[in-house]
Image: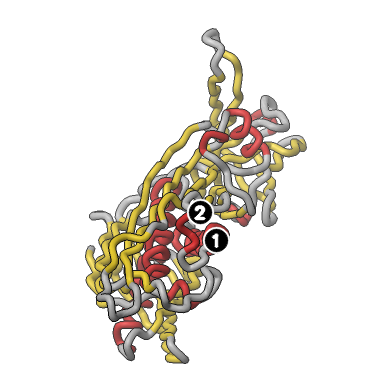
């Protein structure tokens, strides 16, 4: 299914859990560009629908046409087995420079694409590294690293419902993602780590005449790597590039300000950060949630994942015990032993699961790894 919508820049959207099976309620907000309220309304709806589709586990392809850094056209394509059947507009509000809408959408997927779709896998977002520091002098963008990290964290929460995001205030070099670091990160409860570096902030050719304010093309490049710390491998790597007009004499506030992000260059950077979040969703939504056994009590086990990661009371989960051992080749191998459990108690970050017979858990030990591959009431 394709939706082609005239759109302006979208700024905020709150997405809730499904109201009922296949129905999703969300609130979208979009900026009013050049007084065009209708375009802003369509932008809020389009952006909200895309996020709702991601939340529903549907694979989404999004194409945007930008003019002077402003999104002019938004085309949303769902996979061939899915459709948005009905949209109900619940509320609409025009206030200041924004349009806010609340709606419900019925999103149908004819086939479940994967079993880990309702679970939120822990993801550590390292601070974006400002590699192109010399070029940051133009506009004094020396804090773009931490401000872009904050912006990316918000977009991950909106566009990547498959992950539970936590951030650190330091960058991580890809070369430091060694096996020992991966093991430590996994022991600390992480499953994925997102590492990124700004590699280009340079000015290009001058685009203005000699009697005009100095305007240049300005470039931006971001290198991104996503690591699976349990499997100790990089699962996604991409460089994102863009460019926009830059007024060298315009008094632009720092990258912490809304003024910067509303400028053409800031808008282009924001578009890239949204694209990163969407790509993270596509690469993590079908991964199973990993947990560890923290306690064993007769026919029950406690695991270190809970409602924050999408587990619910009464869920039936198929788990796979994973034990690492050294093989003849000296490499660690995995041994899997299937057990089916039911969630009987759940808190934010912990849950109790029980088996129909204590003997099913007799081989489990504290610290064993549990892969939760399915969740269904």
Q: Is residue 329 above or below residue 70?
A: above
Q: Position of residue 103 (x, y in %)?
A: 41, 79
Relative to 376, 265 lies left or right: left
Which residue is painted at 37% across and 83% down in the image? 89
Q: Quadrant of residue 79?
A: bottom left
Which residue is painted at 50% across and 42% down in the image? 288
The reply to whether the C-beta atoms of the residues labelled 2 and 1 are less than 8 Å apart is yes
Q: Is residue 341 above or below residue 211?
A: above
Q: Is residue 185 above or below residue 194?
A: above
Q: SS at mark 2?
A: helix
- Classify 10 Å Cα crowding around label 2: few (below 14), some (14-19), many (20 and above): some
User: Which sits in the foreground, 256 or 18?
Assistant: 256
User: Which sits in the foreground, 138 or 312?
Assistant: 138
Q: SS at mark 1?
A: loop
Mark number, residue 142: 1
User: Which sits in the foreground, 309 or 205?
Assistant: 205
Relative to 99, 151 lies left or right: right
Is residue 50 visible in the rendered image? The answer is yes
Q: Is residue 190 above or below residue 364?
A: below
């Amino acid at each position: 299914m394709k939706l082609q919508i005239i759109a302006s820049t979208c700024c905020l959207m709150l997405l809730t859990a499904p109201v009922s099976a296949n129905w999703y309620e969300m609130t979208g907000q979009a900026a009013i560009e050049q007084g065009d309220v209708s375009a802003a309304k369509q932008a809020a709806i389009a952006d909200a629908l895309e996020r709702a589709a991601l939340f529903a586990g549907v694979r989404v392809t999004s194409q945007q046409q930008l003019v002077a850094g402003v999104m002019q056209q938004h085309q949303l394509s769902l996979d061939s087995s899915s459709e948005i059947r009905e949209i109900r507009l619940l509320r609409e509000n025009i206030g200041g420079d924004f349009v806010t809408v609340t709606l419900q959408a019925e999103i149908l997927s004819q086939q479940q694409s994967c079993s880990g779709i309702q679970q939120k896998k822990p993801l550590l977002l390292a601070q974006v590294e400002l590699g192109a520091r010399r070029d940051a002098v133009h506009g004094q963008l020396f804090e773009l690293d931490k401000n872009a990290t904050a912006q990316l964290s918000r977009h991950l929460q909106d566009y990547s419902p498959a992950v539970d995001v936590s951030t650190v205030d330091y960058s991580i070099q890809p070369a430091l993602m060694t096996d020992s670091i991966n093991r430590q990160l996994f022991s600390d409860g992480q499953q994925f780590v997102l590492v990124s570096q700004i590699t280009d902030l340079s000015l290009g050719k001058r685009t203005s005449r000699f009697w005009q304010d100095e305007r240049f093309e300005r470039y931006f490049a971001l290198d991104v790597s996503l690591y699976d710390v349990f499997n100790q491998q990089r699962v996604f790597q991409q460089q994102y590039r863009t460019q926009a007009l830059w007024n060298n004499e315009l008094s632009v506030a720092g990258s912490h300000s809304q003024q910067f992000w509303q400028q053409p260059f800031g808008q282009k950077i924001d578009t890239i950060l949204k694209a990163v979040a969407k790509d993270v969703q596509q690469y993590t939504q079908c991964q199973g949630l990993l947990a560890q056994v923290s306690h064993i009590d007769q026919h029950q086990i406690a695991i270190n994942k809970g409602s924050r990661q999408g587990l619910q009371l009464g869920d039936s989960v198929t788990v796979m015990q994973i034990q690492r051992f050294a093989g003849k080749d000296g490499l660690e191998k995995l041994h899997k032993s299937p057990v089916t459990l039911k969630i009987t108690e759940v808190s934010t970050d912990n849950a109790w699961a029980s088996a129909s017979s204590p003997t099913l858990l007799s081989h489990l030990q504290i610290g064993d790894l549990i892969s939760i591959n399915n969740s269904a009431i």
